[in-house]
Amino acid sequence: MTGDAAPPGVVPRPPARIRRRALPLIVAGVAFLLLTAGAALAAFRYVPALDEAHALRSDLETMVQRVREAGLEVDRATMDALEADLVTARGRFGHLSTLLASDPLVALARLLPPTSSSPRPGICSTPSARGSPSAVASSRSGGRGPPIRERPPRFRSSWS
């Protein structure tokens, strides 16, 4: 600071005050960008996946309720309704599994130690669960299960 000119090729350093102000601004800007990217990822990717998972759960709860109401007297109409619900649930599950299989955060989570030993997609598929519910029931019982009775629907009279 003697007032002499700097030698050629030497760049003068900015004052320390400017560097001290720039670092918090850079950190705040990066944090803001990360929060914005996380919010966009949640809004466009994870909220629809969560909605799909809720719809799948309600489909499965409907199926369980239908089976509980039928008890041991499952007729063909109930089986057809269960098969239609099963097709819908499998479609939802397939869409959800493909969505999560291509997700970068899920792939990163699979590499971390707590989840590295968990099953990968496709490994847990049960070969016997690929048919209709009646085929699954007969495969589970070795074909010795009770037959599904074909019976006409019962109509209750509103006059009695």
Image (cartoon, rainbow, N blue to C red):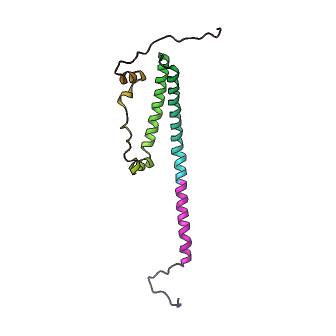
- Count numbered badges in the picture: 0
* Residue in the picture at 55% in, 63% down: 28
Quarter of the image for residue 149 reads: top left
Residue 87 percent location from the top left of the image: 46, 27
The residue drawn where x is 50% and y is 30% is: 60
Q: Farthest residue in the top direction?
A: 159
Q: Specify the farthest residue to the right.
A: 159
Q: Quadrant of the C terminus?
A: top right
Q: Relative to residue 99, is residue 156 depicted above or below?
A: above
Q: Is residue 68 left or right of residue 110?
A: right
Kindly identify the residue that appears in the image at 53 percent across and 26 percent down: 65
Helix, strand or loop: magenta stretch: helix
Q: Which one is nearer the viewer's eye here, 64 or 4?
A: 64
Is residue 100 one of those drawn in magenta? Answer: no
Q: What x and y, as percent, mark residue 25?
A: 56, 67
Q: Which residue sits at x=37%, y=21%?
A: 138
Instruction: Say above or below: 110 vs 30.
Output: above
Judge whether residue 23 is colored magenta.
yes
Q: Which residues are magenta?
A: 12-36
| Image x and y of residue 108, in percent | 41, 50
Answer above or below: position of 140 versus 17: above
Residue closest to the eye, 80 or 61: 61
